[in-house]
């Protein structure tokens, strides 16, 4: 399968421009966020299987792919802000964030802001909320599903 009606485009973000492949089409559009170290090309096997009319944008996050000249910071807040700028520039009225691995965190962070037009979030093999195997002092800073449930039940009694 080949991708049809895909246009290469740059989007302004703080400190530079990120490069994307965009296809105008049916709503909700898919906003495809690649894994840390990946690029928009990560999504090609998925994009080849979409119905021809499905709208999407797959862009290279700052520091990766054809967006390597965009300087940091490379933190989650900045990556979420970049994603919002891409969405805003496209003017999507309805869209779904699709975050892979580390960018699952970016998708969740952006979704937590409750932006206009967000119709859903898809997490593909999302990174854990805390580093696995890190120092115990660091791990204690992050709630686990078990501690979160315990806190919820204690608060509801």
Image (cartoon, helix red, strand yellow):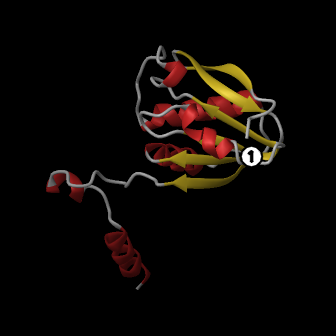
Q: Residue at 51%, 15% (x, y): give it.
A: 15
- Res. 113 in view: no
Residue found farthest to the front: 1
Residue 115 at what x, y percent from top left? 66, 44
Is 150 left or right of 52, judged from the image as shown? left
Q: Residue at label 1?
A: 117
Count the numbered circles shown: 1
Residues 97 and 2: in front is 2
Mark 1 crowdedness (10 Å alpha carbons): few <14, some 14-19, many ≥20: some
Residue under the image location 72 percent in, 27 percent down: 89
Residue in the foreground of this view, choosing between 83 and 69: 69
Q: Residue at x 69, y 20 (%)?
A: 9
In the rendering, at what x and y percent does residue 48 appear? 70, 42
Q: Residue furthest bottom?
A: 157
For the N terminus, the image quarter is: top right
Question: Which percent across, then down, holds residue 114?
Answer: 63, 49
Quarter the C terminus occupies = bottom left
Up-down: is 92 above or below 8? below
- The reply to whether residue 102 is in sight is yes
| Relative horizontal placement of residue 92, taking residue 108 as reference (left or right) | right
Secondary-structure class at tag 1: loop
Whether residue 144 sits left or right of residue 100 in the image: it is left
Q: Quadrant of residue 141?
A: bottom left
Identify the residue shown where x is 70% and y is 21%: 8
Examine the rendered structure and indicate whether residue 125 appears above or below residue 107. below
Seen in the image, is 74 located left or right of residue 113?
left
Q: Give the percent coordinates (x, y) of residue 3.
A: 74, 35
């Amino acid at each position: 399968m080949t991708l049809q009606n895909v246009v290469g485009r740059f989007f302004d973000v703080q400190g530079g421009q990120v490069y994307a492949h965009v296809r105008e089409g049916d709503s909700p559009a898919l906003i495809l966020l690649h894994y840390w170290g990946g690029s928009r090309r990560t999504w090609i096997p998925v994009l080849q299987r979409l119905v021809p009319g499905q709208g999407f944008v797959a862009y290279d996050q700052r520091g990766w792919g054809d967006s390597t000249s965009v300087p940091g910071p490379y933190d989650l807040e900045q990556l979420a802000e970049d994603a919002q700028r891409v969405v805003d520039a496209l003017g999507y009225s309805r869209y779904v964030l699709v975050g892979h691995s580390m960018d699952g965190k970016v998708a969740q962070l952006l979704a937590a802001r409750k932006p206009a037009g967000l119709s859903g979030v898809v997490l593909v093999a999302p990174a854990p909320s805390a580093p696995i195997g890190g120092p115990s002092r660091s791990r204690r800073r992050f709630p686990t599903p078990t501690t979160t449930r315990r806190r919820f039940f204690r608060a509801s009694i």
